[in-house]
Image (cartoon, grey):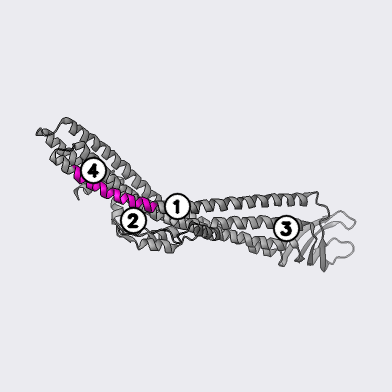
Amino acid sequence: MNSRLTLTFGLPLAAAASLLLTQSLRAANLSEIYQMAASQDSVIQASRAQYEAAVEALPLARSAMRPQVAIAADVAENENNDDRGGRFGSNAYGASITQNIFNVPATRSIKQAKATVAAAEATLKEAEQNLIFRTAQAYFNVLTAKEAFSAASASREAIASQTEQAERRFDVGLSAITDVKEAQAQLDLAVAREVVAENQMALAREALRVIINQEVPPLDGLREDAALTAPEPASMEEWIAVAKSNNPQLEVARKEYEVAAADIGIERAGRLPTVAIVGGYQKQSSDRANDQISAQPSKSESGQIKLQLEYPFITGGSTSALIRQAKARSTQASFNLETVQRAVVQETRDAYLTVLADISQTVALEKALNSTEVAKDATQAGFDAGTRTAVEVLVSLRDTFDAYADYAAARHQYVVSSLQLRLAAGILAQKHIDSISRSLEPGS
């Protein structure tokens, strides 16, 4: 309790106020933090708006094959220099309607628009899965930084105690001044490490604060008995197959290739005729008060309906150039698709192997932690018996707290790597972080 109070009042006023504010907030688990992120993260909000804009490509494409109605009206003041001369006013209004009945480019554009919308859906899915991963990664970065700071603080306190003991032993003539100097040097290093760890914890909290757009509450920590399970299915090739079917980045690349391939057909169709039904109606009147022939206003009314054929006979080479351009872009899209597929396979392989490595590393670090604790106790006992030096005691203390921090970091990294594997496979969902939340316990 005393050390915690000392730490609080030793901070700058703003940092102390922030710490007290954080401690006053209710603790939250990963699922609750994700809900904050889903409603506040600016990246996902922009992605949703981008999706809403992209899906309009389909109704825009369909509009070309639907009736087009226009209404026009005008009022004018006219002056003639002919024999009748004079100034007069006129007004007119009318309407026109056009209905395409044969327009291959417009028809093919609808199919292209469907692929564009599918690409937008996959892009949004990618953004949503990235938000889940970014939130979880930032969450566990805070937990890792907190454990590292706790270990650094505990190490500093333990080394400070050893330094005081070394000074007392020196005062009564039981140790040399070198023991005191070595202890002080280790204490200075421990203080510096604690400052760095505190800064890293503040940076980690700030990164999470940006995502949830509010102060970070106390976070639930990972239970000590949280299981380390191997990926299921246990075959790397099965994970790769899942990724090829579900990875949203790969789906976006596929749809972009479809869009580019459809563009070739659209440009080729530019050589074909188009047929449309066109109808129009117009009513016009004028007031010719100075008309020498008639003082009566003139009026006219007309209407027509026609079948209109347009054939692009000569386009100056633009159609051929557009076709060549579309083919080149299609080739580019096909290579981009191959590049993305290779990258997805690599990411999935790397993520799968990383999960296995994290499990092995965590198990090894747990054994290392147990070993360092035993070694610390043995070194302390040897020091009390006069067979070990004070420096060896200090080193064993530092190693023990380092091992604790490394073990905590490895456990957190395993969780993040498990999520990254699902992200690479394209199946990361909220149910996965809900499952992780059940492996957490209230933190402080």
Mark 3 vs mark 1, foreground winner is 1
Asked whether residue 366 is drawn in magenta, I would say yes
Residue nearest the observer in this picture, 344 or 140: 344
Give the residue type that dot 3 points to. Gly
Mark 4 vs mark 2, foreground winner is 4
Q: Is residue 18 visible?
A: no
Label 1 vs label 4: CA separation? 33 Å
Residue, disc 2: 217
Magenta extent = 358-379
Label 1 vs label 2: CA separation? 33 Å
Residue, disc 3: 265
Asked whether residue 72 is drawn in magenta, I would say no
Question: Would you place residue 334 above or below residue 102 in this image?
Answer: above
Residue, disc 1: 353
Residue nearest the observer in this picture, 340 or 32: 340
Sequence-wise, which precedes: disc 1 or disc 4?
Answer: 1
Please rate how many residues cluster around mark 1, counting C-alpha atoms within 10 Å: few if below 14, some from 14 to 19, many from 20. some
Give the residue type that dot 2 points to. Pro
Mark 1 vs mark 4, foreground winner is 1
Sequence-wise, which precedes: disc 2 or disc 3?
Answer: 2
The image quarter containing residue 121 is bottom right
